[in-house]
Image: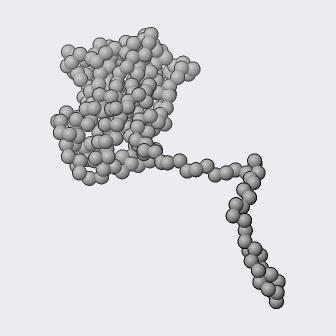
Amino acid sequence: MDLAPDGGPSSLTMAPENPPQLLLSPNLDVPAPCPKPGPPENPLKQLLVSEEDWEFEVTVFYRGCQVFQQTVFCPGGLRLVGSEAGDRTLPGQPIRLPDPAASLTDRGVTGYVQRVLSCLGGGLALWRAGQWLCAQRLGHCHVYWAVGEELLPNSGHRPDGEVPKDREGGVFNMGPFIADLIAFIEGSRRSPRYTLWFCVGQSWPQDQPWIKRLVMVKVVPMCLRALLDMARVGGASSLENTVDLHISNSHPLSLTSDQYKAYLQDLVEDMDF
C-alpha cells in the first residue's frame, strides 16, 4: 500500500496478485519440520542395556564365615582374583579376595584357603553379554556355579554347571527371569531367582552343608533384585499402587502396575539387546 503525501489526494497502489518468491541464501539454515514423536522407550530396557547401571553385590565366605562384601559398578565385568591382583591387562575390574589369615583362626583352614586363592591366576571373570551373564575361569582353580536364593545356595542338589576355562559359558539368562517375574506378578507363588553362587577350588556342596566349603562367592545383580522388589510392592500377585524403582545412579522410575507389566512383556518379546 502506497500512501500519498500529506495534503495530496490519497491513492492506493495494490500489491500484485503473485508476489515474487522470497530468495533465500544457500547459507541460511531452514528449520526442519518437527518429526512426529515415536513411542516411548521402554525404561526397563534402558536399565538392562546400560552397562553403567549394572551394579553387583559381591559377598565372599571362607568356611561359612563372611569375610568380604562390596557393591561395585562393573561396566566391563568383574574378575575375582587372589591375594595378588593378577594380570592387570585382562578385561574386567579385579576384586581381590581377602587374606584368610586376617579373619580365620584355624591355621589348617587358612592354609587351604590360601592355596585356593593362589591358584586363581587371572581370576574368575563375570560379565554381561546381551541378555546373558557369562563366566570364565582364567586360572587352574575349578569353579562350580548355581543360581540360588540370596540367603542359601542350592546345596544338596547338583550344581547348574562348571565354569569353563578355555571359553566363555553362560551362567544366567535374563529371558526366563523376566518371564518368571511376569508369572510371579500374575499369581504364581515362586519368585524368580537371580543370585549366582560360585564354589571355588572344590566340588559343589552336594553332600555336605555349603558352610563346609573353603571358598564360596555370592554375586547379586542389583538391577534384578530391584525388579523383583518392584513386583513385591503391595503383594506380588496384585500390584495396585504406583511403584518406584531406584537403582544405583539411574533416574528413579514411577510406574503403575499395568505399565510395569507391559514393559516386562515388551522385554520378553525383544530380548536381543
Quadrant of image for the N terminus: bottom right
Q: Which colour scheme is used?
A: one colour
Which is nearer the eye, 172 or 116? 172
When asked about the image quadrant of residue 12, the answer is: bottom right
Question: In terms of image quadrants, where is residue 2?
Answer: bottom right
Give above or below for 6 relative to 207. below
Q: Is residue 195 left or right of residue 248?
A: left
Q: Is residue 128 above or below residue 20?
A: above
Q: Where is residue 131 in the image (x, y as percent from the top left)?
A: 39, 27
Res. 118 in view:
no
Q: Residue at x 50, y 28 (%)?
A: 76
Q: Where is residue 21 in the image (x, y as percent from the top left)?
A: 72, 56
Q: Between 95 and 255, which is closer to the camera in this rendering? A: 255
Q: In which quarter of the image is the C terminus?
A: top left
Residue 74 position within the rendered picture, expressed as x and y whole percent measured from the top left: 47, 32
Please report the residue visible at 35 percent of the width from the left and 35 percent of the height from the top. 267
Front residue of this view, candidates 252 and 108: 252
Image position of 22 (left or right of 270): right
Nearer to the camera, 114 or 47: 47
- Whole-percent x, y for residue 89 in the image: 57, 20
Residue 187 visible? The answer is: yes
Asked if residue 256 is positioned above or below residue 134 in the image, the reply reads below
Q: Is residue 31 left or right of residue 221?
A: right
